[in-house]
Image: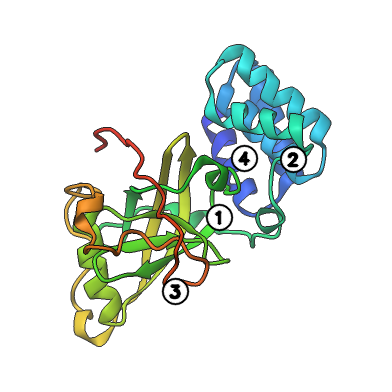
Amino acid sequence: MTDAQNTARAIQAALRNDWKEAIKLNIDILKEDKENVDALNRLAFAYLRTDDTFHAKKMFTKVLTLDPYNPIATKNVKKLSTTGVAISDSQASSPPLSPLMFLEEPGVTRVAPCVNIAPDKVLATLSYGQQVFLKAKKHCVEIRDSKDQYLGAIPDDLSHKLIDFLDGGNTYTVVIRSIGKNALSVFIRETSRGKKFVHDPSFVGTSAYVGFASKADYAPGEGPDVSATGEESDEEPPEEEDTGSHT
């Protein structure tokens, strides 16, 4: 079996929460390529899921010898060194996700990089494949976790379209596609259409988005709502992160 096939199977095992199989497959990959950073990170994460923090830290540390600035390994080694734990209880109890969730379909799915991202300490609690939720506001669509904690916002042009679709009764499943330093992207899948948009696909074109949302795109005094319940709060909104020019 080729490395590409093993990689695909290892990812599918992780999405099923079959961590013993994920460990076996990533070890097989590393037998052929000892410096495969992605396989090392996957193996370390699988060890974490089986409560083997010793080997998890060992694998993350090896990643850093090959890639000193690797954000996944850096974050987890730091957490393991200070707390002995690298994933939260909410992550550990996440339901398994079908690999089909990540298959892109024209008009039905979209990968969206987030803007106005939550602080790194919040991003550190998240995991690849974790289900999150859309929350429509007046001028934007926010991404929130199962506890209604603010994670980021969808770029403005896509937000404006999603607000209309959500208001029209469309429903979507959203999972985390990638996490990095000051970076978060989500995979959005249309799961049903309201009567108003029964013949209209949610996503048209190949670009994930046209422009970025900024603080100026929110109504005066609104900003991203970072309160736990979505109610008005005296807390300051998260500072807008410099996401650079992404496409």
Q: Which mark is residue 88?
A: none
Going from N to C along the chain, the mark reached first, 1 or 3, is 1
Determine whether 30 is above or below 204 in the image: above
Residue at 24%, 60% in the rendered image:
218
Q: Which mark is residue 10?
A: 4
Per the model, the C-alpha gap separating discs 2 and 3 is 35 Å
Q: Which residue is mark 3?
A: 231
The amino acid sitting under disc 4 is Ala
Per the model, the C-alpha gap separating discs 4 and 3 is 41 Å
Q: Which mark is residue 130?
A: 1
Residue 67 occupies quadrant: top right
The amino acid sitting under disc 2 is Leu
User: Residue 213 location, x and y as percent?
Assistant: 24, 51
Going from N to C along the chain, the mark reached first, 2 or 4, is 4
Q: Nearer the viewer, mark 2 or mark 3?
A: 3
Per the model, the C-alpha gap separating discs 1 and 3 is 24 Å
Residue 63 occupies quadrant: top right
Q: Which residue is mark 2?
A: 48
Left or right placement of residue 171 versus residue 37 in this view: left
Q: Secondary structure at mark 4?
A: helix
